[in-house]
Image (tube, rainbow, N blue to C red):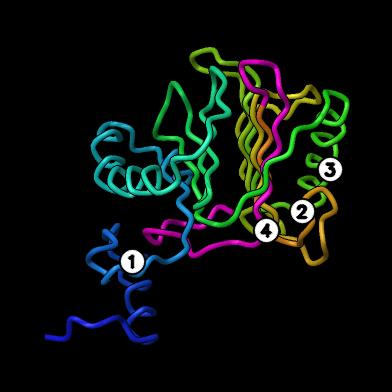
Amino acid sequence: MNDGPLSPQGKAAARTMVTLGGPVRDELLGGFEFEFELNTDASLIDQRWNDFDERHERRYGLAIEHLKSRVKGRAYDNDAMKLRVGARGYYVQAQHFPAAFFGDTGKANVTFVSESEATALVWEVVAHYRADEARSLTAVYTDDEPPDFFFGYRVSDYRRYELGFLRSSVPLHLRVLFDAEAEVPVLGASSGTLVYQRTRGGKHVVVRAHGRRQPLLGAMPLG
C-alpha cells in the first residue's frame, strides 16, 4: 500500500470519487484539499417531499458540515439567510430552511456599498438574468415563514424554471450564478457568483467570487 502523497492522476481520481460518490473527508484523500462548490438547489425542486428530510440529510448533510467547518469566517447574517465568508471560501444558508444551501471554496471578495448602489446593483443583476447571461438567480425579500422569494434558473437557451415573483425592490438576500460569454461588469468576470446581503445592522454587503469550482456530489447543475 502506498502511503505517500497523491500523484496528479490520483488527485484527479479523488476529485471524480468525491463528485460521484458523495463527500469524502480530507484525510481519506491523503490530506489533498480540492476546490469545489456545493449547491442544493436541485433537491429543493424535487416533488417527492414525503421523505425529503431523510434523503436530503443522507445526500448533503456531511458535505454541508464539511464545507462549513472549512470556511468558518466572518458572519454577515440577517433573519432570512446566513452568510459566512472566510479565507477558504464562503457559504449561504437559509435560517428557517437549512436545506437551502450554497457554498464555494473559491476566493471571495467582500465589499460594502450604499443603499443607492445596492439598488443599482440589483437592477443590473436582474437585467443580466433576463438577458440569459446568468445561469440562476435567487432573491429573498422577507424573513417570514415561508418567505417572499424568487428562484429561477436557465435550463437551456430556450427554457427557464422560475418560482415566485422577481421584484424591483432591494431584497434581504440575492445570489446569482453567472455564465456569460463576455465579462459581466457587476461581477468583473464572465463566470462566477455574486451575493448581496442586507445585514441585521442595515449594512449592504456584496460578495464576488470569480470562476466556478467542481460541483460536489454530482448534483444536477443549476448554475
Which residue corresponds to the image point at 88% horizontal and 25% vertical from the top-left?
116
Instruction: Please state, as top left, top right, bottom left or bottom right, where the N terminus lies in the image.
Output: bottom left
Upstream in sequence: badge 3 or badge 1: 1
Look at label 2 and name its amino acid: Asp
Which residue corresponds to the image point at 55% horizontal and 25% vertical from the top-left?
77
Magenta-span inclusion, residue 210: yes
Q: CA distance from mark 1 to mark 4?
A: 24 Å
Q: Position of residue 146 (x, y in %)?
A: 50, 17
In which quadrant of the rendered view does residue 158 lie? bottom right
Q: Tell me the residue that label 2 is attached to.
A: 132
Element marked by disc 1: helix
Q: CA distance from mark 3 to mark 2?
A: 9 Å
| Residue 164 horizontal side relative to residue 87, left or right | right
Q: CA distance from mark 2 to mark 1?
A: 29 Å
Element marked by disc 4: strand
Q: Position of residue 102 (x, y in %)?
A: 50, 44
Mark linked to residue 20: 1
Q: Tell me the residue that label 4 is attached to.
A: 210
Residue depth check, mark 4 versus mark 2: number of the one nearer the observer: 4
- Magenta segment boundaries in residue numbering: 198-223
Front residue of 182 and 89: 89
Above or below, comparing residue 147 to residue 152 in the picture: above
Q: CA distance from mark 4 to mark 2?
A: 18 Å
Look at label 3 and name its amino acid: Ala
